[in-house]
Each structure stands twice: as structure tokens, then as C-alpha cells.
Amino acid sequence: MKVASVTVNYKTADLALRALEHVLDDIVPLGGRSIVVDNDSQDGSYEKIAAAVRERGWDEHVDVLASGRNAGFGAGNNLAFRHAMSWDDPPEYFYLLNPDAYPDRGTVEHMVRFMEDHPRVGQAGTKVRHPGGELRLSAFRFPSVWSELEQGLHLGLASRLLDRWKVVPEAPEQTGEVDWVSGASVILRRAMLDEIGLFDENFFLYFEETDLAMRAKRAGWSTYYVVEATAEHIGQVSTGIKDTKKRRPRYWFESRAYYLRKNHGRAALLAANTAFAGAYLLHEIRKKLTSKTDQDPHRFFRDFVDFNFGRGLRP
């Protein structure tokens, strides 16, 4: 089999069915299958999706799996990977699609063709747009001590001097290699997963795509951003972080710390935490002096300090 799509659902059954309808337009002509994993929604999502698949006659092309536990984005995808790898004819590629993301017609076919033409590309993300048509940033740089300094400062001149380390740069205008891409609409090569392993399930949510891309890079696989293929993405429907002022959940801090410690060591994590905290304090002083406001999450800096230097996100 050439390709299988994977969508992990958590309490978004209606959106997941819409995403499934879009992706099947591409998957079926390619002779592929779609897998939907319900991550223990406990709201009837699994039953609703499974019933809709039967009623719409999609049984031949769609497998609906119940994870039995919500262990996060990576674990949900891994369940689908292992399921597909057990088939007599496992897919060469996995196209990951969020339940609130909808690929344009021809997107999956284009991404498969791109991977066929670039055998050392391990994964590739599509261009992503907001529902209103505005470009959504989905190609990034790896986090580092310097990027933590840049993010903490929020200062124009200093940020410009640190521009090359920004995790969120300007969107590329041409197809090319990047550090990592959003998992909302991305194709993965099974041969890469066979070599480097699946998602690290120690990440509940966030940074798991970054970690996979880092492992791929260290093993000699490239990650690309492909501007000729596009998907619409609503964003943060399942996570609840759509409101940028909402308090950042504990698992975000856990994933960030685990990523830096795993990939760069404890000393680098301490340096990154210190760089961010020091830079953010300067930002806070400047904000007080200029009476400016920002869009940081509620209690963000206190939570950051408490988690990384204190007892860990007290109420």
C-alpha cells in the first residue's frame, strides 16, 4: 500500500468526520486507507464515528480504533502506526491529519509524489491556512538556549539580533528544508519510522513532532515544508489553548523540559531556563515602564518559574 491517513480524535467527532471526508477524496484513488483513533474521549465520539463510517459505506476504506486511554497525541498516532504495520501490505507513507484540518483536493497525492521524488526526506509538512484564508505558520526551527533568550526578551532590537534562532520564523515562500513542521498536516515515511522509532510517548502533547524531527535529522533524514500542497486548520480545538490568555497547562511545561533535557542535556535545560527567565524579567520591567500589555497566558511567568525552579505549578 502506498499511503494511509491517520487522525487522532479527542471529543471532536463531527470535525473528525469532516476531516475524514476530505482526506478520503485523496486516499481512495491512491488505493490507501484511513485510520481514525479515538483517544478515550468518553463522550460517545468513538461510537459516533464508527456508526457514521458504516452508514456512509466507508468500511472498506476506514478503520476506527479505540485507544482505551488518552495518552496523548503521539501515543494515539503510534497506535495507528502499529495497526497499519501489521497489515499484509503496510503503507509506505503515513499522512497525519488533525481532526480540525482539511486538506485541499490533491494534497495527499502531491505529498506522496513529493516523497517519491525525494527519497531522503523523512517527513514533509504542507502549507497550512486559517479558515479565513490567512497563512498559518507551520514550519519551525529547533528550540535552543538562544531561542529561549529571544522568546523571553520580546524586544525589537534584541530579537532582530537573535533572528536566526527564532523558533517561529517567517513562513518560507518556496518548498525547502526546515527543522520541523506542524503535525496538523504532515506525511511521514514508514522507512524513517522503522529506523528511528515512533513518537516518544513520554510527550503527552506538544514537542513530540519536534523530537521526532530532531531524531530524524540526527539519523540523516530531512524534513521539508511543501508550499504547493495546502490544508485548512482551525487549531487548538482539542487542547483548549485557542485562547492565548488562558493559563498554559502543566503538560506544556513538562513537554518543553523533557524535550530540552532529552535532546540537549540537563545543563542545556538549566541554561535555557535561566536565559528565558532573565530575558523575561527584562521584558516585564520594560512592560511596566511603558504600560504596555501583551498576549502571554495568564500567570505564565509565575508558572514557568514555579515549574522549572520551584515545586511545579502549584494552584
Image: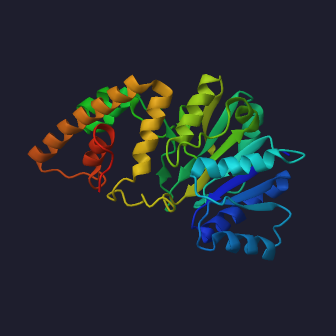
Q: Is residue 93 above or below residue 66?
A: above
Could you say which is closer to the camera, residue 203 or residue 89?
A: 203
Which corner quadrant of the image does residue 315 belong to? bottom left
Check the image and name the residue furthest to the left. Answer: 289
Side (left or right) of 41 relative to 257: right
The colour scheme used here is rainbow
Check the image and name the residue furthest to the bottom. Answer: 55
- State the image coordinates of residue 267 (x, y, percent, origin top left): 38, 23
Side (left or right) of 253 relative to 108: left
- State the image coordinates of residue 102 (x, y, percent, origin top left): 62, 59
User: Which residue is drawn at the image coordinates 58% and 67% (left, top)?
Assistant: 12
Could you say which is closer to the camera, residue 294 or residue 268?
A: 268
User: Which residue is drawn at the image coordinates 26% and 39% (left, top)?
Assistant: 154
- State the image coordinates of residue 219 (x, y, percent, origin top left): 65, 23
Residue 168 visible, this orientation:
no
Residue 180 visible, this orientation:
yes
Q: Is residue 82 above or below residue 233?
A: above
Q: Is residue 295 above or below residue 189?
A: below
Q: Is residue 45 above or below residue 102?
A: below
- State the image coordinates of residue 211 (x, y, percent, origin top left): 55, 35
Check the image and name the residue furthest to the front. Answer: 311
Which corner quadrant of the image does residue 10 belong to? bottom right
User: Which residue is drawn at the image coordinates 64% and 39% (left, top)?
Assistant: 124
